[in-house]
Amino acid sequence: MPVLECKGLTKRYGSVQALSNVDLTVEPGRIVGLLGPNGSGKTTFIKLANGLLTPSAGTLTVCGVQPGKESRAAVSYLPERTAIPTWMSAQQLLDFYGDFYQDFRRDAAEEMLEHLGIQPRQRIKQMSKGTREKVQLIMVMSRAAKLYLLDEPIGGVDPATRDYILSTIIGNYDPEASVIISTHLISDVEKVLDEVIFIDRGQVVLQSSVDEIREEKGMSVDALFREVFRC
Amino acid sequence: MKWEFSNDAPIYAQLITQIKVGIVSGVFPPGERLPSVRDLATEAGVNPNTMQRALTELERDGLVYSQRTAGRFVTEDAAMIEAVKRSLAEGHIRAFLDAMGRLGYQREEILSLLRQEESKEETIHASLGM
């Protein structure tokens, strides 16, 4: 069963068409890049997939069910903006995730935090922006979810933090689960991806594997993206 | 091992070449167990399925082999490793000759340039007492 499937998925905000007639399928074990310029519909798509928005038309299912209570248990979501409560300590954050999510792998999270040198008593407030991003990603990847939705996980962080985030995604790879990463920083992520979805003004313009693009076009996904979306 | 990728070729193909170099140069010695797919993928910073694909192809060619539970091992066939070394070297030489050809050099000139370069290096080594 596909982890995510949508047919004719459409989302309108008033008269603005944010997504129109999107058909796509994501199989288990895939790391997929959702790539498009600003305002192309990436965040709208992710919010539809985790049930924060409802479609105007068409269908979307996660592991065969419509977004709701059941699908939320299977989806781990990293929002574009850091959303962890800053007054908490690392310890409290671990408790918080443990309370909320049955699939939270506390041992894995503790190990990753320790590896970063984060003390249990350290407060999120006292951490740099890069560290907060890392901590939030650790929380999201420590769930044994079926679908990870990562909205711009590497935007606005330094290259070393980017490498850390990408290797954390690879290190937590699960052949039963899928990861969708939305970004416009393509050259940084393309080696990590199985396949890419190009999205432009709410429409899917391409879904292909990274190595297929490189084999057939003799260029990187980044170069192809620049060609497709030339201003 | 340092992993590097260019933009013009599929990633799995570049992984195959780099693992071959690792085997030929002894980073992955004959008969030794290779790290797991996940560890290799993390180290190279690539997708685990892409790494898996590269290893599957190396296995098909016989350069690595699987033991059901113990993992993947480098072949102990020295002749096979030597042949891989030779074919990697030929690739480098072809690329070099192509590049020199584009600069307008003929074969004889290229050979004489190579000899000059070699004697230059010998002189440097001699002067350093090496």
Image: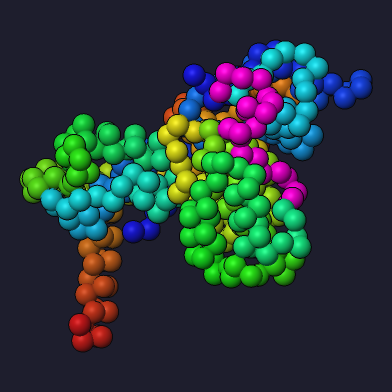
Query: In the figure, residue A230 lies in which quadrant?
Result: top right
Q: Position of residue B29 (x, y in %)?
A: 17, 55
Range shown magenta:
A63-83
Q: Position of residue A153 (x, y in %)?
A: 64, 47
Main SS, magenta residues = loop
Q: What residue sits 78% from the left and 28% below the top?
A: A53
Q: What residue sits 21% from the left and 36% below the top?
A: B59
Q: Is residue B35 visible?
A: yes
Query: In the figure, residue A16 lies in which quadrant?
Result: top right
Q: Is residue A113 left or right of residue A152?
A: left
Relative vertical location of residue B92 with respect to residue A61 in this rendering, above or below = below
Q: Is residue A32 left or right of residue A29?
A: right
Q: What residue sits 48% from the left and 60% below the top?
A: A111
Give yes or no for residue A221 being in the magenta stretch. no
Which residue is more in the foreground, B6 or B30? B30
Q: Residue furthest right?
A: A14
Q: Is residue B84 left or right of residue B55?
A: left
Relative vertical location of residue A179 with respect to residue B22 in this rendering, above or below = above
Q: What residue sits 92% from the left and 20% below the top?
A: A15
Q: Position of residue A219 (x, y in %)?
A: 51, 35
Q: Is residue A210 visible?
A: no
Which residue is more in the foreground, A100 or B35? A100
Q: Is residue B112 left or right of residue B98?
A: left
Relative vertical location of residue B91 with respect to residue A90 in this rendering, above or below = above
Please identify the quadrant where the C terminus of chain A is shown.
Answer: top right
